[in-house]
Image: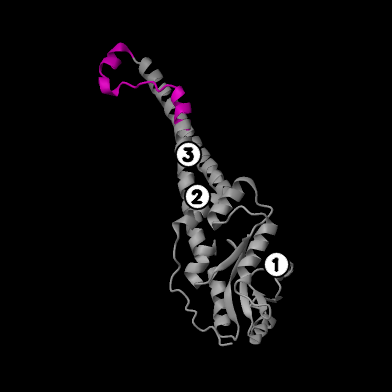
Amino acid sequence: MESNDSFLRPESTEINLHDVFWYILKNWIILLVCMAVFGAMLGLYKRSSQAKTVAASEESVAEYNALSDEAKAKIKAADIPKLVEKSTINSAFKKYLILGAFVGLFLGAAVLAVYFVIMGYLPNSTAVRNRYQLPTFGILPNSKISGLNRKIMNKLTYRANLPWEEAVRLTAANLAMHLRASEELLLVGTVPKKTLDKIRKELLTVLDVHVETAGNLNNQASAVLALSRGAKVVCVEKVLKSKQVYVDFEMDTLAASKSHCIGFILVE
């Protein structure tokens, strides 16, 4: 089989607002912490400042009241001190508590967005298709994700809410359209070897082909040597953990080998 030497590394990463938005929302706990911290900081600061203002007004009014009528008459009306009500302390605290919460929300979201772009994660099959022009055969769920986090993750990955077993069968069915019974399938990826072994075991229960785990092409010589057999290869990567730059290195290695990458499997 001829080497797949057509891979060209993209010059820049495409920023998808859908991915950025749902990544930020996925970290809603961080956003709540930022809102609470900034809200408390601004609220307490303003309450302290307003309390000093109230105390200063009380002192000024007391000094004015202690003056004689002649001394009071010499003071312009605009310069007569006015008492600031104590109730303004709580109102100022509440106002700046809310303002601080919005500031924390904005800053937290901005930091998360920048972090997401800098880290260059693979978030979903659309990102895989745009960057590598290859299909994603399936996205295997993490059973530990549930409730609101599950709904957000499904939105981020464009994934139907399927249980693990059904997701494996769907992945195998998509793979079967690209394989013949006599062919060998190699699993590679930057995920841990135990993840590759688990997926291999699951696929073997459904697929009637020879499936082997090669490993990480970036740091395992045995994985690179396995490519010399000219097999079809599937890259297994983790959603929001695998970084595009390291997957790029894998694709460079694959492009120079006798083997051919036919697509990806993503795991949560």
Residue 235 in the image: x percent, y percent? Answer: 61, 72
Q: Are marks 3 and 2 in contact (CB under 8 Å)?
A: no
The residues bearing labels 2 and 1 have C-alpha atoms spaced at a distance of 36 Å
The residue at which mark 3 appears reads as 42
The residues bearing labels 3 and 1 have C-alpha atoms spaced at a distance of 50 Å
Residue 190 found in image quarter? bottom right
Q: At 63% across and 71% down in the image, what residue appears?
A: 176
Residue 220 in the image: x percent, y percent? Answer: 67, 79
The residue at which mark 2 appears reads as 108
Badge 3 or badge 2: first in the primary sequence:
3
The residues bearing labels 3 and 2 have C-alpha atoms spaced at a distance of 16 Å
Q: Which residues are magenta?
A: 68-93
The amino acid pointed to by label 2 is Gly
Q: Mark 2 packing: few (<14 Cα in 10 Å), some, or many (20+)?
A: many
Badge 3 or badge 1: first in the primary sequence:
3
The residue at which mark 1 appears reads as 199
Q: Mark 1 packing: few (<14 Cα in 10 Å), some, or many (20+)?
A: some
